[in-house]
Amino acid sequence: MHFKTIFKSLKNKDMLRRVGIIFGILIAYRLLAQIPVPMGDASTFREAVSNLLEKSDFSSFLNLISGGGLASFSIILVGLSPYITGSIVIQLLTKAIPRLEELSNDGETGRRKINQWTRMLAVPLAILQSIVYIFILYQSTLSANIATEFTPTLGDWALSVTAMTAGSIILMWLGELITEQGIGNGISMMIFASIISQLPTTLASLGAALFNTENGTLSMFGWFELPVDPTTFFIVLGFAVAMLVVIYFLVKLNEAQRIITVNYAKRVHGNSSYGGIKSILPIKIIAAGVIPVIFATAFLSLPALIGQVITTVDPGNEFGTSLVSIFTAPSANNFLAIYPDGITGQWFIYPAVYFFLVFVFTYFYTNSVVFNTKEIADNLQKQGGFIEGVRPGIKTAEYLSKVVSHLNLFGALSLGLIAMLPFITDYIFIMTTGSPVGLSISGTGLLIVVTVALENLRSLDSRALMVTYDDFGDELKN
């Protein structure tokens, strides 16, 4: 990174305008998070939301990527989830339907058409998700005997769903504005800002435990006393060091890749010769990014969400209660309620299944969507490219498939361990302090933050080099 060039580029008016647009949109985004849904008393529904967050890991994930919009019962409650889901669906359909695949390869026109379909698909998904959450929240207020004299009419339902859908579409629009007028990918930056905005929650939780001196204070070599809990202090210190180490390895894993050298045969056409050069084919260790983790979270949380709907309609239903109990992720919010006597064997079920699903989805998504070895081998053969020591065609596809499988093994294990970070941290805190600590940034969130931060830094660096290119040329002349 050329940090000196980046600081120098801030003197450029266009660069300042783009940076100003980003900060302005992010401020507007945080203001939207404070506007409540027009559905009765907002405080009543916030209480129902807190109960829902304790019972559904998927709801907690949605609350994370919406910047706390779910917990505050704001109009951006559903956040960017419909757009993300629509993007995943369209991406999978693009690989499954040949017509869509041809369209995606049709340059900028095809990509714009697919983006338009993604936006169109996000609207009904936002409507559906808004209806489901409003229904669950309202029924939760009734089943939990939360005091409310509000009985929504059909007009109230329509207004609330419209407001939540509009909030989701506005977020999508703001994200695309950042992409067009700012720097980097706007949707990724919005999610990045959402996750970062939850940091104060974690810091407040750690601070409350750190400065709780009921069990004594920390003696510094007998010279003076620090007003902190000794056990929590060393845990927090170890956690901070571990966090730095994890971020370091996340950066390395995100940037790590296997370089395969591709040779191009020399061709003579008339008096001109072509080819005879070497190129590279980079294969990233974690080519699938965070998609497998999101897939696993959604897949594993669906039974709990269904169980929540069943128990909301019929509180005494044993099947719904079982689904919620088995498929609820262990966390600081539900630990004492589900495990009053401490950790049991059930505590390990969710993390184990979660790790397995992340591992499986990493293989599935990389091999079927991200890296099609047969297609790459065919393209290399058509362009006259070959890998040294490997025959073109089927043998090249088999070689690439073997390389990708080996990288996938390490990448899938790495992603699985990253997804396990909150469970590992909670287990350590349970063994040492008796209860887990509520981390607002999970392994998934941390991976998103690191990945998006690196992408935005690269985009900022490229933009800075571009706007300072003339100055660089003048310096060379002088």
Image (cartoon, rainbow, N blue to C red):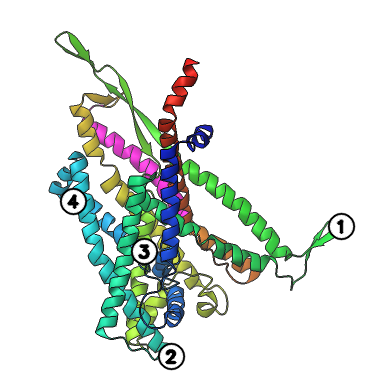
Q: Residues within 10 Å of mark 3 (few under 14, many from 20)?
A: many
Return the x and y of residue 389 as percentages of the image width and height.
Answer: 30, 24
Residue under circle 4? Answer: 96
Can residue 177 be seen at all in this image of the molecule?
Answer: yes
Mark 3 = which residue?
Answer: 79
Identity of the amino acid at label 1? Trp
- Tag 4, which secondary structure? helix
Mark closer to the chain start, 3 or 1:
3
Ranked by sequence position, the earlier of labels 3 and 2 is 3
Q: Which residue is more in the foreground, 316 or 84?
A: 84
Q: Earlier in the sequence, mark 4 or mark 2?
A: 4
Quadrant of res 160:
bottom left
Question: How far apart are the two marked residues, 1 and 2, measured between alpha carbons?
Answer: 55 Å
x and y, in percent, of residue 268 in the image: 18, 12
Instruction: Give left or right: position of 424 versus 99.
Output: right
Residue occupying image coordinates x 46% and y 24%: 472
Q: Is residue 112 left or right of residue 54?
A: left
Residue at image coords 55%, 65%: 201
The disc labelled 2 sits on which kind of residue? Asn
Q: Quadrant of residue 222?
A: bottom right
What range of the chain is rendered magenta?
Answer: 391-419
Residue that mark 1 sits on:
223
Amino acid type indicated by mark 3: Gly
Name the kind of residue labelled 4 in the image.
Ala
